[in-house]
């Protein structure tokens, strides 16, 4: 900027200087020309007088001088010319200045050469014998004078240029230095020349506006980051060349990446589904796909981003749907199992009834058949009841209010209800030990849980076996243990007995009236109450299942 100001001021001054010199030269030319004309006139007058008194021969003294002197007789014939042989010159009677002098005593004319490059001034004076003395001078004379002036002018010009350069440099520094020293952090606080004040005011206003806009943008960015970083869903914004513009932590986490290896989103995940979703969204379609990777399932949703109907990028959302998929799978399995479990007793009922209808059952066995139908119907009822219970727990659609429940008292009630069942199997069920222990929960579910555990402890017990129920508590926890001396659960089945319809021995379970849902109901009931379940079992020796509740 400094050199630009310097150059501008230097060249401006230089041009003004040149223009001034040309202008002055023009004026000088004019002044000198008039001066020479005047001199020519005066010279002509003097020479005329000298010729009058000294005779024409006097003129020969001027042979070869710069100024041309010509003597012409009254008829226009050239009598003498100090620069040319008079005999070679033609008649001058018709020349303007001669004609004027002949008529008025004096004549003057200016003539240009054929090429117009040369200008000559003629001044003529009539003598007493009617001859004419003419002095002529040409423009070269003026140029010669000007040429003489050229040297001092060039010197002045050089001095002026040096001065201009020095002054321009100073001026540009005087302008630039305060600008360079401006403190733009605090534009209002600068003390400088007043021409800068409007600029500083404008900068100050713009700085304020920019600060406000920056603060606003930062706030929006923070809000955006807060939202995206707290999302469980992966979030990616890409440009039209698949380069990642922004992403949240969840996106990398879900794709199992710590840092993106390249700018392209395609490098984040090499699956066909991911690639297709990215490329399809960039060709202006909303794209959706399910991707399976590392035993997990992800839903990919990509929407193109438009600007003036052109796709400029895409927004990609990655959702971990593994749990949803698992639940869906479980639901499908459950439905298939339910259908199968319902079908078996119904087929038996239908078979028995058909036989009876067709009279194919002898009278003495009708009672047995009816009993079978009744048993199967009971099984169906238990099954449907268990299905309803587990579905309610599943949907968390239990409308009952939580209340204080004493697990010791509840266990006592359950023992009373199951006593006859236990007696039938020769199992001792009256060993309740422990203390009164209250928790807040849903009585119906808690009842169901302890009942199922005790029921299993009886069902899968041995002849003369026992069932112990121990209710104990600490400051923070309350636990119920149902322990039996039954057949036990082989280790390989222990982790699966809480699954729906999972039985170690299907025929045994059916024989003892099991539905395969008892422990699943216990597990869901525990989940409902945030309780933990643990199982210890030794094949042939017995099983102990413990539910631990938080004391609240
Ligand atoms: P079921 O209605 O068949 O009893 P459960 O869900 O209650 O279904 O139990 C699942 C399976 O776990 C049972 O079929 C049985 O094989 C096994 N089981 C449950 N409780 C006991 C126990 N106390 N002793 C031995 N095996 C048990």
Image: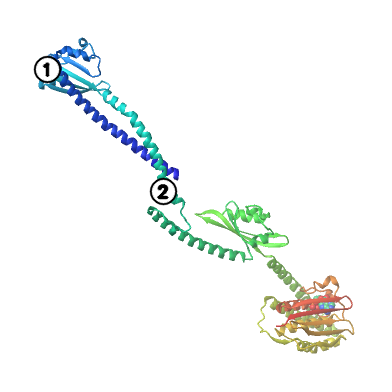
The residue shown at (43%, 51%) is: 178
Which of the marked residues, 2 or 1, is nearer the chain's N terminus? 1
**Residue holding disc 2:** 175
The disc placed on residue 127 is: 1
Q: Secondary structure at mark 1?
A: loop
State the quadrant of the C terminus: bottom right
Asked if residue 141 is positioned above or below residue 513 in the image, the reply reads above
Q: Is residue 221 above or below residue 361?
A: above
489 sits to left or right of 189: right
Give neighbour class at mark 1: few <14, some 14-19, many 20+ (Cα, 10 Å).
Answer: many
Q: Which mark is residue 345?
A: none
In this picture, residue 71 sits left or right of residue 210 = left
Q: Which of the two residues, 107 or 417, is positioned nearer the viewer here?
A: 107
Q: Position of residue 267 (x, y in %)?
A: 66, 53
* Front one among 267 and 384: 267
Q: Is residue 236 left or right of residue 543?
A: left
Quadrant of residue 482 in the image?
Answer: bottom right
Which residue ends up furthest to the top in the rendered image? Answer: 87
Q: Quadrant of the N terminus?
A: top left
Q: Is residue 514 visible?
A: no
Residue 49 % position (x, y): 13, 18
Q: Are marks 2 and 1 in contact (CB under 8 Å)?
A: no
């Amino acid at each position: 900027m400094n050199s630009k100001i310097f150059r501008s001021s230097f060249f401006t001054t230089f041009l003004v200087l040149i223009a001034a010199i040309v202008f002055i030269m023009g004026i000088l030319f004019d002044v000198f020309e008039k001066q020479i004309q005047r001199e020519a006139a005066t010279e002509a007058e003097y020479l005329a007088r000298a010729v009058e008194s000294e005779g024409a021969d006097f003129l020969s003294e001027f042979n070869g001088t710069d100024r041309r002197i010509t003597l012409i007789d009254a008829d226009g014939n050239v009598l003498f010319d100090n620069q040319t042989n008079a005999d070679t010159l033609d008649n001058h009677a018709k020349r303007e200045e001669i004609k004027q002098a002949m008529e008025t005593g004096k004549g003057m004319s200016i003539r240009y050469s054929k090429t117009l490059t040369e200008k000559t001034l003629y001044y003529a004076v009539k003598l007493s014998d009617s001859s004419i003395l003419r002095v002529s001078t040409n423009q070269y004379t003026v140029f010669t004078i000007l040429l003489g002036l050229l040297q001092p002018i060039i010197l002045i010009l050089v001095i002026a240029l040096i001065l201009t350069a020095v002054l321009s440099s100073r001026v540009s520094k005087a302008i630039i230095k305060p600008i360079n020293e401006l403190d733009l952090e605090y534009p209002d606080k600068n003390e400088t020349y007043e021409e800068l004040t409007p600029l500083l005011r404008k900068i100050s206003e713009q700085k304020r506006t920019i600060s406000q806009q920056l603060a606003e943008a930062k706030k929006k960015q923070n809000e955006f980051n807060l939202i995206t970083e707290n999302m469980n869903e992966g979030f990616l914004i890409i440009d039209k060349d698949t380069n990642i513009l922004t992403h949240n932590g969840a996106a990398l986490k879900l794709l199992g990446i710590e840092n993106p290896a390249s700018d392209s989103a395609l490098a984040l995940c090499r699956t066909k589904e991911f690639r297709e979703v990215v490329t399809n969204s960039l060709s202006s379609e909303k794209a959706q796909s399910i991707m399976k990777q590392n035993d997990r399932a992800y839903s990919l949703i990509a929407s193109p981003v438009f600007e003036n109907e052109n796709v400029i990028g895409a927004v990609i959302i990655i959702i971990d749907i593994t749990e949803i998929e698992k639940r869906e799978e479980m639901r499908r399995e459950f439905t298939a199992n339910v259908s199968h479990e319902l079908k078996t007793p119904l087929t038996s009922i239908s078979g028995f009834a058909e036989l009876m209808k067709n009279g194919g059952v002898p009278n003495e066995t009708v009672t047995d058949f009816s009993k079978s139908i009744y048993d199967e119907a009971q099984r169906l009822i238990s099954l449907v009841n268990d299905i309803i219970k587990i579905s309610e727990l599943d949907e968390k659609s239990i409308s009952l209010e939580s209340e204080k429940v004493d697990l010791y008292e509840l266990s006592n009630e359950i023992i009373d209800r199951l006593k006859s069942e236990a007696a039938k199997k020769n199992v001792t069920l009256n060993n309740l030990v422990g203390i009164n222990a209250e928790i807040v929960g849903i009585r119906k579910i808690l009842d169901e849980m302890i009942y199922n555990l005790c029921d299993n402890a009886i069902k899968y017990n041995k002849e003369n076996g026992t069932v112990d129920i121990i209710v104990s508590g600490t400051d923070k926890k309350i636990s119920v243990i149902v322990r039996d001396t039954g057949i036990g659960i082989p280790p390989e089945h222990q982790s699966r007995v809480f699954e729906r319809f999972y039985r170690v021995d299907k025929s045994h379970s059916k024989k003892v009236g099991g539905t395969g849902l008892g422990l699943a109901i216990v597990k869901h009931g525990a989940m409902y109450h945030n309780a933990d379940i643990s199982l210890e079992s030794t094949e042939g020796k017995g099983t102990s299942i413990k539910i631990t509740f938080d004391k609240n």
